[in-house]
Image: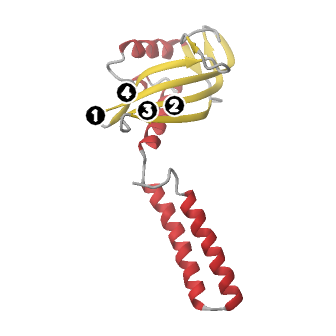
């Protein structure tokens, strides 16, 4: 288990120590400082490689979020529905309907992603904003939206169990196809 969310803090510490050791070596020309500096540089690289190899539950569910959004944007019904729990029948039906009537353009931007894990990392709530041009009922407009998705780990995979559209400004719940 990784002791920080990212490898940046230990990498910064190792880099600062490497810089201090390099300055000491430059001033005194003692080999032990240069060896220590090189060791710290290698340790920094090691932390980076370690970070790449560790995928936390938070990173996994956020990756699934972006994959779900991409599949929806490309109108890949089977792929999109594979991210939604089979038990969430009303949500699956709504997504099928939305795939048929909504077209999301390529200018979609996902921002303000925050993930909260609960129940020993088996339930995740992801809050995010989606801004882009969408066509609905023949009308095209750039629309800011805000969403909260609840994911549950089922059989080793993350599945959406609930989707809530929120007012982009106030955060109050909105109906899925409400005009705002």
Nearer-N-terminus badge (3/2): 2
Q: CA distance from mark 1 to mark 3?
A: 15 Å
From this viewpoint, which residue is outermost toward the right?
A: 27
Mark 3, residue position:
124
Q: Residues within 10 Å of mark 4 (few under 14, many from 20)?
A: some
Question: Is the Cβ of the residue at disc 4 closer than 8 Å to that at disc 2?
Answer: no
**Residue tagged by mark 1?**
155
Task: Label 2, secondary structure: give it.
Answer: helix
The mark nearer the N terminus, 1 or 3, is 3
Q: Secondary structure at mark 1?
A: loop
Q: Residues within 10 Å of mark 3 (few under 14, many from 20)?
A: many
Residue under numbered circle 2: 70
Count all numbered tags in the image, as a single digit: 4
The span from disc 1 to disc 2 (Cα, nearest Å) is: 23 Å
Other residues around mark 1 within 10 Å, as few (<14) / some (14–19) / many (≥20): few
Gap between marks 3 and 4 measured at Cα = 17 Å
Which residue, given by chain and number where applicable, does mark 4 sit on?
82
């Amino acid at each position: 288990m990784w002791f920080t969310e990212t490898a940046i803090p230990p990498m910064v510490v190792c880099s600062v120590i490497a810089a201090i050791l390099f300055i000491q070596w430059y001033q005194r020309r003692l080999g032990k400082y240069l060896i220590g500096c090189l060791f710290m540089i290698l340790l920094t690289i090691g932390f980076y490689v370690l970070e790449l190899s560790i995928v936390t539950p938070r990173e996994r569910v956020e990756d699934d979020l972006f994959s779900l959004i991409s599949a929806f944007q490309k109108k890949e019904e089977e792929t999109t529905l594979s991210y939604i729990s089979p038990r969430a029948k009303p949500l699956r039906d709504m997504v099928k309907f939305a795939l048929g009537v909504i077209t999301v353009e390529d200018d979609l931007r996902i921002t303000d992603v925050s993930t909260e894990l609960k129940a020993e990392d088996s339930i995740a709530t992801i809050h995010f904003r989606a801004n882009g041009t969408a066509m609905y009922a023949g009308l095209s407009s750039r629309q800011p939206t805000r969403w909260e998705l609840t994911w549950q780990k089922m059989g080793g995979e993350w599945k959406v169990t609930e989707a809530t559209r929120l007012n982009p400004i106030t955060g109050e719940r909105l109906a899925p196809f409400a005009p705002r």
